[in-house]
Image (cartoon, rainbow, N blue to C red):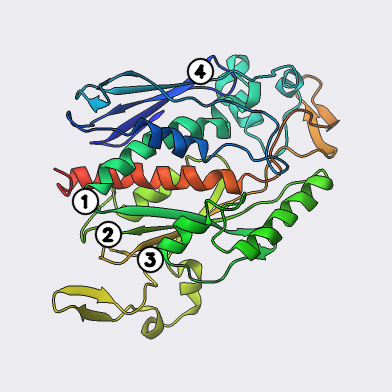
């Protein structure tokens, strides 16, 4: 299915080398004023950067085809289109017979047969995060109405890690100032060098994006199966390249005792209930607990590398060596920061509508 959400429903359409990609958003109330410049800026945040990004350059102009009049929502589904204008499909024909290691080529052909569109990765391409980011920008605008704000940053790339705790304002300020969208400008330089070193080797690297949400009301989530963390996890795994997610202390919790992992409660300003620590990552029992929603998303190294790799020839059913050509990112992590924020906003908007936190 290409649709996610219950009250705020997002359907994406198109593929990497189609005429266009886009999304249909259902559930936006009538009368909401949208800032189209803001939506465009959010989509632009996922564009490749010189030296560390793919040479493929797309304008990524966001066009609203329906559901908006004078920049105000009309109540019908909002239709967004983003045209593909810089495609080169010539390098992909051989992958129909020789699947690329690390890509979805082989399982996709088994599922869809010869009709599968392999050009640019088709529907499995990271390009599909462009309309996702546009939808997320709209969701962010709706969340601002209840003072919910989201900020993500690159926490690690390859062997370079940023273990520090950063304030929300610091993340928002610093991530716009460096090409890897890190929260620490000095570590950003090391991350940049890590990517360039892998690129020079014809290789790639992965990393981690950390995402924080402030202002979320207590009780967001719909147990048993539509929990806050469960819905977030499902959405994150829809982003190409994601291989893992953890909330709060995450897997470190397995090495803690309960006396350490449990977050003690306190009363703040005589009326707010907060916890002294946030090992739970802002989620208990699948519900938000009033603390910042805090999770990390792991991205694998880009599957397309410029080294010879072992594969098979599906026509001959024998081993074959493959060398990938084309235009690819040596690291997708910096470009994933905006989609992670957007995907988070989509889930939170849907759950806040379902829980009547958004009128």
Residue 154, percent from left and from top: 56, 56
**Apparent side of residue 150 relative to residue 193 in the rendered image (left or right):** left
Circles 1 and 2: CB distance less than 8 Å? yes
Please tell me whether residue 306 is drawn above or below residue 260 in the rendered image: above
Indicate left or right for 331 with 163 as reference: right
Residue 215: numbered disc: 2
Query: Distance from label 4 to label 2 (Cα)?
Result: 36 Å
Task: Specify few, some or many for label 4: CA neighbours under 10 Å numbering under 14, 14-19, or 20 or more.
Answer: some
Image vertical order of residue 269 relative to residue 50, above or below: below
Q: Position of residue 98 (x, y in %)?
A: 76, 26
Q: Which of marks 1 and 3 precedes in the sequence?
A: 1
Label 3 or label 1, whichever lies nearer to me, is 1
Q: Secondary structure at mark 2?
A: loop
Q: Residue at x 69, y 59 (%)?
A: 189
Would you say the residues marked 4 and 3 are in contact, meaning their CB atoms lie under 8 Å apart? no
- Where is mark 4, residue-wise? 20
Asked if marks 4 and 2 touch (Cβ < 8 Å), the reply is no
Q: Are marks 4 and 1 in contact (CB under 8 Å)?
A: no
Which of 91 and 186 lies nearest the eye of the viewer?
Answer: 186
* Distance CA(mark 4)–CA(mark 3): 38 Å
Residue under pointer 3: 281
Q: Which residue is mark 1?
A: 146
């Amino acid at each position: 299915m290409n649709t996610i959400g219950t009250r705020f429903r997002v359907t994406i359409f198109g593929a990497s080398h189609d005429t266009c990609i886009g999304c249909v958003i259902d559930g936006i109330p009538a009368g909401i004023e949208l800032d189209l410049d803001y939506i465009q800026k959010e989509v632009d945040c996922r564009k490749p950067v010189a030296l560390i990004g793919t040479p493929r350059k797309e304008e990524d102009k966001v066009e609203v085809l329906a559901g908006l009049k004078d920049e105000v929502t009309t109540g019908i589904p909002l239709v967004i289109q983003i045209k593909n204008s810089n495609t080169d499909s010539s390098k992909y024909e051989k992958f129909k017979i020789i699947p690329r290691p690390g890509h979805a080529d082989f399982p996709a052909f088994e599922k869809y047969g010869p009709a599968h569109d392999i050009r640019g990765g088709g529907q499995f391409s990271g390009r599909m995060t462009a309309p996702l980011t546009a939808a997320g920008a709209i969701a962010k605008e709706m969340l601002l109405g209840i003072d919910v704000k989201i900020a993500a940053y690159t926490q690690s790339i390859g062997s370079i890690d940023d273990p520090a705790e950063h304030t929300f304002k610091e993340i928002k300020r610093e991530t716009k100032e460096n090409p890897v969208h890190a929260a620490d400008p000095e570590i950003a330089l090391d991350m940049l060098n890590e990517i360039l070193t892998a690129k020079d080797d014809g290789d790639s690297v992965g990393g981690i994006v950390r995402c924080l949400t402030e202002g979320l009301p207590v009780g967001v989530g719909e147990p048993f199966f539509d929990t806050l963390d469960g819905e977030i996890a499902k959405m994150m795994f829809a982003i190409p390249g994601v291989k893992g997610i953890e909330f709060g202390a995450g897997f470190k919790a397995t090495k803690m005792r309960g006396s350490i992992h449990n977050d003690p409660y306190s009363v703040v300003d005589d009326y707010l209930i907060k916890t002294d620590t946030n090992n739970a990552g802002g989620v208990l029992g699948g519900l938000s607990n009033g603390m910042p929603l805090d999770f990390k998303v792991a991205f694998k190294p880009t599957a397309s590398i410029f080294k010879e790799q072992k594969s098979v020839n599906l026509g001959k059913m024998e081993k074959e060596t493959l060398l990938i050509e084309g235009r690819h990112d040596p690291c997708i992590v910096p470009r994933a920061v905006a989609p992670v924020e957007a995907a988070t906003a989509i889930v939170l908007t849907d759950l806040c509508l379902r829980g009547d936190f958004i009128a």
